[in-house]
């Protein structure tokens, strides 16, 4: 069934629509302004042109004909009912009216105005411009005209290039695709979607490859046929050489969207207008689609056995006492039901007692107390907590939130946390204060282990918990890693909880600069070097040191910072040994990718172990956070021989 403006009508041919255009008489002028008789008459395809920028940008146009296809609060989209055969030129455009337009869907109009390129984020932003006509007059020539038929995306219609975003640029450095390079919609996805900007577009039998978030849902047309590599649960896997430009992001700007999980479907045809804003092309559906539940379950793991040390990662996604009780219960369920109560959890994303209130608070004991209480209420054990409180607003993230990394641990199965003050350690010349004065500024060091468990000569920490090189520029306005020394039935282990720099400063995939720069990766690479240096210092004291690096590294397993972290450290990244279809902990705009990581030193990596990513959050609209927890169970039974990695079951 056709949507808005087509109810009760069969689609007409372009010739029939054109005839209706020619025969109709003017009905109204909106607003009441005289048509511009001096500007040359243009068609929409003349305004759009064969490129990212309009060839008449900044000029006045008159009597541009079109049929209104969708209306919003400050303008409308219109499309030419008589398209040419050139797929490189869009036949649709947005008309900016500033206030609610009088023109309605199905009106045949002619528009006077000035052509402009609206760039979300301002003129200096990396986003593409959206071609639009800033209307000075809109002449309604007929009402009830059938809207032009939509372009179908996918195997049954026009198919987006699947492997590249800007194939016409093979040289070094970047180009601005708006001003350089060839416009090749058949090869470049960024050009492909630009050629459809402002037009009616249809997705048939769409399947969600990401959860609903901020009024948007990423989908694949045609139930994902012909798309890139899929995950085992219906998502779309991000690969080093394929950003999956075949994804289509649905937006609720014109009609509400149902809450969706990965694998949910929108059966039948769903139509909208293709728009662009803030680094992404978005399909604004003009009617609310019907959702079919995909039945995606939340995963659980098995409990650890006697002799197995279970270490997990959990991202709390800015948890504070301001969060609703339901969120604490959901996170507790992740720990108790999903992870089956691990011995040690590397926690990231936990805020202070006042949340985002910028009131000088840095302590997080109330946040932790509510979380521990929720875990106990869910049937879990009594967990304890260790961390180092940051200095106020020194660690980035939400201002006032003072997010930090730390450790939740249980002691009823043989694990103990070693508490050691840094008092008496030498001063840190990079900080200029005596060690022990402020734990947030005091760097932790590798030292020979005392005879208090773990065996003589084993490596220990100068302070536990202690921060890793907190004054290093790599951690400027970023969360500092925290190292903790624990014992497991007499065996000394160093665990480093990390929350590396996020990717908010990166250029968008569908931006004007190609290939897009990822400056955040440079920050993470610098952070990887610092953590790698600390691991090497531990192994310099004891080559067989038991070391675990865990947490939210905000990076894909194939990226340079992960190679930097493992180079010369002996660390073994566990995600890279997981089957590709399960190798993701978060879903970003429909791309399933890694963010949480666990790495083991050789002395632990050679033991029998099982690693799992427990998919409970990233794929769901109703979730406690946006990252999936991960867990490794290491068999440290003294009678067990060392063996190679046991991959995920």
Image (cartoon, helix red, strand yellow):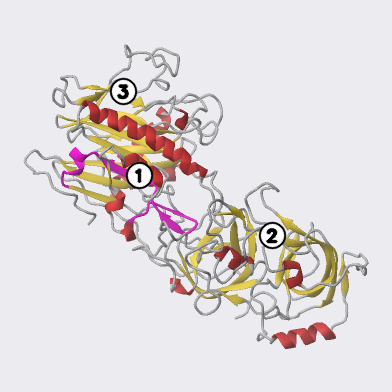
Q: Are marks 1 and 2 in contact (CB under 8 Å)?
A: no
Q: Are marks 1 and 3 in contact (CB under 8 Å)?
A: no
Say left or right for 399 vs 445. right
Which residue lies under the disc numbered 2? 130
Q: Which mark is residue 563?
A: 1
Whichever of callouts 1 and 3 sits on the residue coming sooner in the sequence is 3
Say left or right for 419 vs 480. left
Q: Which is more toward the observer, 649 or 363? A: 649
Which residue lies under the disc numbered 3? 445
Could you tell me which secondary element the residue under label 3 belongs to? loop
Q: Which is more toward the observer, 210 or 581? A: 581
Could you tell me which secondary element the residue under label 1 belongs to? helix
Foreground: disc 1 or disc 3 = 1
Whichever of callouts 1 and 2 sits on the residue coming sooner in the sequence is 2
Q: Dividing the image into 4 quarters, which one contains the N terminus?
A: bottom right
Compared to residue 442, the image places residue 591 above or below, namely below
The residue carrying pointer 1 sits among few (fewer than 14), some (14 to 19) or many (20 or more) residues within 10 Å by Cα, namely some
């Amino acid at each position: 069934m056709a949507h808005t403006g087509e109810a009760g009508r069969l689609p007409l041919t372009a010739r029939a629509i054109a005839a209706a255009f020619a025969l109709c008489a003017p009905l109204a002028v909106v607003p009441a302004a005289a048509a511009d008789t001096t500007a040359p008459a243009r068609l929409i395809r003349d305004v759009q042109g064969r490129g990212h920028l309009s060839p008449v940008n900044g000029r006045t146009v008159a009597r541009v004909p079109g049929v209104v296809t969708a209306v919003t609060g400050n303008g409308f989209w219109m499309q030419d009912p008589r398209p040419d055969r050139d797929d490189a030129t869009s036949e649709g455009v947005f008309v900016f009216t500033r206030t609610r337009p009088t023109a309605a869907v199905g009106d045949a109009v002619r528009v006077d105005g000035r052509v402009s390129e609206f760039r979300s984020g301002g003129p200096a932003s990396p986003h593409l411009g959206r071609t639009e006509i800033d209307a000075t007059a809109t002449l309604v020539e007929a009402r009830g005209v059938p809207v032009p038929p939509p372009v179908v995306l996918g195997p049954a219609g026009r198919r987006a290039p699947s492997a590249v975003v800007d194939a016409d640029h093979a040289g070094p450095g970047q180009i601005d695709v708006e001003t350089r390079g060839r416009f090749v919609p058949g090869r470049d996805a960024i050009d492909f979607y630009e050629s459809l900007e402002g037009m009616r577009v249809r997705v048939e039998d769409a399947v969600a490859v990401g959860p609903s978030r901020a009024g948007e849902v990423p989908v694949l047309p045609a139930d994902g046929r012909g798309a890139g590599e899929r995950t085992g649960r219906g998502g779309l896997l991000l690969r080093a050489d394929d950003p999956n430009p075949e994804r289509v992001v649905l937006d609720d700007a014109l009609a509400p969207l149902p809450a969706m999980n990965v694998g949910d479907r929108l059966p039948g045809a769903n139509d909208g207008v293709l728009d662009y804003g803030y680094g992404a092309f978005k399909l604004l559906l003009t009617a609310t689609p019907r959702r079919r539940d995909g039945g995606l379950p939340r995963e659980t793991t098995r409990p650890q056995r006697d002799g197995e040390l279970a270490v997990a990662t959990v991202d709390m996604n800015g948890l504070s006492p301001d969060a609703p009780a339901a969120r604490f219960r959901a996170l507790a369920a992740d720990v108790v039901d999903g992870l089956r109560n691990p011995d040690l959890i590397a926690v990231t994303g936990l805020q202070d007692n006042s949340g985002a209130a910028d009131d000088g608070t840095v302590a997080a004991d109330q946040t932790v107390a509510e979380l521990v209480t929720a875990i106990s209420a869910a049937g879990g054990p009594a967990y304890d907590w260790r961390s180092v409180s940051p200095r106020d607003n020194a660690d980035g993230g939400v201002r006032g939130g003072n997010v930090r990394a730390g450790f939740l641990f249980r002691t009823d199965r043989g694990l103990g946390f070693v508490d050691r003050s840094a008092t008496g350690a030498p001063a840190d010349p990079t900080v200029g204060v005596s060690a022990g004065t402020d734990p947030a500024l005091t760097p932790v060091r590798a030292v020979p282990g005392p005879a208090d468990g773990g065996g003589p000569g084993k490596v220990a920490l100068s302070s536990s918990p202690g921060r890793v090189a907190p004054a290093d520029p790599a951690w400027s306005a970023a969360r500092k890693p925290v190292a903790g020394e624990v014992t497991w039935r007499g065996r000394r282990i160093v665990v480093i909880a990390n929350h590396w720099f996020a990717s908010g400063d990166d250029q968008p995939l569908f931006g004007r600069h190609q290939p897009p720069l990822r400056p955040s990766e440079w920050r993470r690479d610098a952070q990887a070097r610092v953590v790698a240096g600390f691991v090497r210092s531990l192994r310099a004291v004891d080559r067989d040191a038991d070391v675990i690096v865990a947490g939210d590294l905000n990076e894909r397993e194939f990226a340079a910072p992960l190679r930097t972290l493992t180079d010369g450290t002996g660390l073994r990244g566990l995600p890279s040994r997981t089957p590709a279809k399960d190798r993701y902990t978060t879903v970003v705009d429909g791309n399933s990718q890694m963010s949480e990581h666990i790495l083991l030193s050789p002395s632990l990596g050679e033991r029998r172990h099982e690693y799992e990513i427990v998919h409970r959050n990233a794929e769901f609209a109703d979730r406690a956070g946006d990252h999936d927890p991960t867990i490794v169970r290491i068999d440290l039974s003294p009678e067990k021989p060392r063996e190679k990695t046991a991959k995920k079951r």
